[in-house]
Image: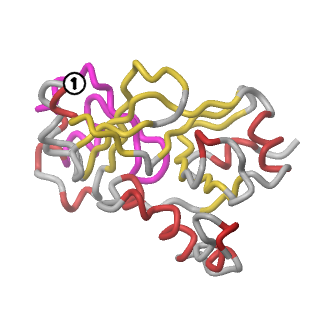
Amino acid sequence: MTEVSSLTGRLLVATPALADPNFDRAVVLLLDHDEEGSLGVVLNRPTPVGVADILEGWGDLAGAPGVVFQGGPVSLDSALGVAVIPGEEGLPPASRRRAAKGEPIGFRRVHGAIGLVDLETPPELLAAALGSLRIFAGYSGWGPGQLEDELGDGAWYVVESEPGDVSSPDPEQLWRAVLRRQRSELAMVATYPDDPSLN
């Protein structure tokens, strides 16, 4: 059996053939992927709801646009924080000492500089350590083997993530941007028309 955990931290980019409207041109960051299933958040679905309107104290830490993103169709009434922690050289001395001992309080590293934020933690404890923060309502989930089946059906492209993907200032263009930076035929998919019937 291949090691399924290797997809944690990678991006799932919806292929033009993916028919599920929940994932039309979606870019999903996989936060967990193992034999028990997969969990991720859609990075390019901003909502009109401001972070400050629903989570007191977190609005000032959320990157632009400072809105809640729809992380997927599952548990839309729950909030999930995803953040990027910059390298230790960019941290103030107190945060550098905490980083040397492990993760900042309220942060669990997922992949590279990307991790999950415990939104029950007082925001001021994390403010100095966070490079960027996004808040997601809900998440995208797959049961055991379900994502592998979708990959086998050609529903998703799997590509490397970059820390800037989490905080893209232009999330509506993220699908094209992620595909365009690929050094393969995937770069051409970025030019796929929104409505192919108009060609």
Which quadrant would the C terminus be assigned to in this image?
bottom right
Residue 41 in picture, x, y percent from top left: 49, 40
Colour setup of the view: secondary structure
Considering only vertical position in the picture, is 41 above or below 56? below
**Residue drawn at the location 28% of the way across and 56% of the way down:** 86
- Would residue 79 be found to the left or right of residue 35 on screen? left
Q: How many discs appear?
A: 1
Residue 93 in picture, x, y percent from top left: 11, 50
- Residue 183 occupies quadrant: bottom right
Answer whether residue 175 is magenta in the image: no
**Residue drawn at the location 17% of the way across and 54% of the way down:** 91
Q: What amino acid type should be assigned to the residue bearing mark 1?
A: Ile
- Would residue 38 be found to the left or right of residue 106 on screen? right
Residue 28 in picture, x, y percent from top left: 55, 47
- Would residue 18 be found to the left or right of residue 135 on screen? right
Residue 131 in picture, x, y percent from top left: 24, 52
The residue positioned farthest toward the front in the image shown: 198
**Residue drawn at the location 80% of the way across and 33% of the way down:** 145
**On the image, numbered disc 1 is attached to which residue?**
54
Q: In the rendered structure, which segment of residues is drawn in magenta?
A: 96-125
Query: Element at badge 1?
Result: helix
Considering only vertical position in the picture, is 151 above or below 194? above
**Residue drawn at the location 45% of the way across and 62% of the way down:** 174
Task: Choose between 179 and 80: the one closer to the eye.
Answer: 179
Task: Choose between 103 and 64: the one closer to the eye.
Answer: 64
Which quadrant would the N terminus be assigned to in this image?
top right
Bin the neighbour count of mark 1 within 10 Å (Cα to Cα): few under 14, some 14-19, many 20 and up.
few
- Residue 195 occupies quadrant: bottom right
